[in-house]
Image (cartoon, rainbow, N blue to C red):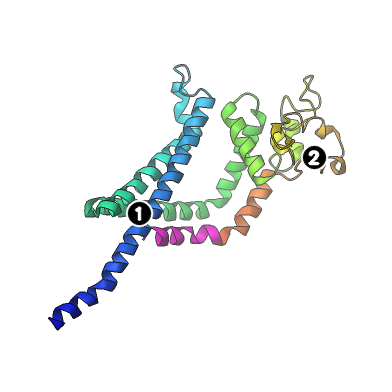
Amino acid sequence: IKWHLLHQSSRLPLDSFSHCAKCLTFTWNTISSIIGLFILAIGIWGLSEKESLESERITYLGSDPMLFFVLVGLVATFISLLGCTGALFESIFLLKLFTGGIIFFLVLEVLSGIVVFSLRQHIKTSLQNFLMVAMLQYQDDLDLQFIMDEIQAGLQCCGVKSYLDWKANLYFKCTSPGVQACGVPASCCLNPLENGTILNSQCGFGTLGMEEFAVQSTIYLGGCVPQLNRWLNSHAGTIGHFPINLATNYS
């Protein structure tokens, strides 16, 4: 009897640990599922707003950047639900699928990091060329306009190398007869919202015809390529440790 009680008491810590690990795995994957659904909702909302799901535009769906959000949201939600249900029902099969998915994406991320590091100069040049194309076709392509606005607002920058790059745009150059002449997009503005709620789409109008000291309180002066380089350099450690952190969180 004493041996039986001792044997049972020796299993309590293991059972408690297993129960704790199960709860943590379930909670973490539930949160990840919610995040995945949120990303998926953003992608679907973007496709709906741009009417990319309409029959006349469905052929261009493959090149729509919002499709990336949809795919990432679907994959993240699916993998998280595998971990969630596997932990809840203690299914070894589902947990193996979940672990396999995590390992696959970790390997994919490491390989992507190696490729990016090896081709960083080529990627920098390609990115610069892409931003230039997005800037030149800003009014003609809604997808490029969306991407350019997100980059400029997110990195707090304007243009490729400086805000003066917008002079190359057909509608923003100072010789243009339109109302946008000598202006920049609202995403270049320091504070594009009036009263914190209404977007002032004309906040950057006329800035290209003014002196730099006069517009520095209205728009961002620095270009997006230098700003992106500074961001990558300042977050190099975080980016490098991301696979390790991800593996730790899911293990």
Tell me which corner region of the image, top left, top right, bottom left or bottom right, holds residue 250: bottom left
> Of callouts 2 and 1, which one flags the residue occurring earlier in the amino acid sequence?
1
Q: Which of marks 2 and 1 is in front?
A: 1
> At which x and y percent is residue 240?
51, 60
Q: In which quarter of the image is the C terminus?
A: bottom left
Given residues 153 and 136, the one toward you in this image is 153
The disc label shown at residue 26, or none: 1
Residue at left 42%, top 49%?
Answer: 32
Q: Is residue 69 visible?
A: yes
Whether label 2 touches label 1, CB < 8 Å: no
> At which x and y percent is residue 52?
49, 24
Is 118 left or right of 145, judged from the image as shown?
Answer: left
> At which x and y percent is residue 45?
50, 30
Q: Which amino acid does label 2 sit on?
A: Thr
Residue 72 highlighted magenta (yes or no)? no
Q: Mark 2 points at which residue?
A: 218
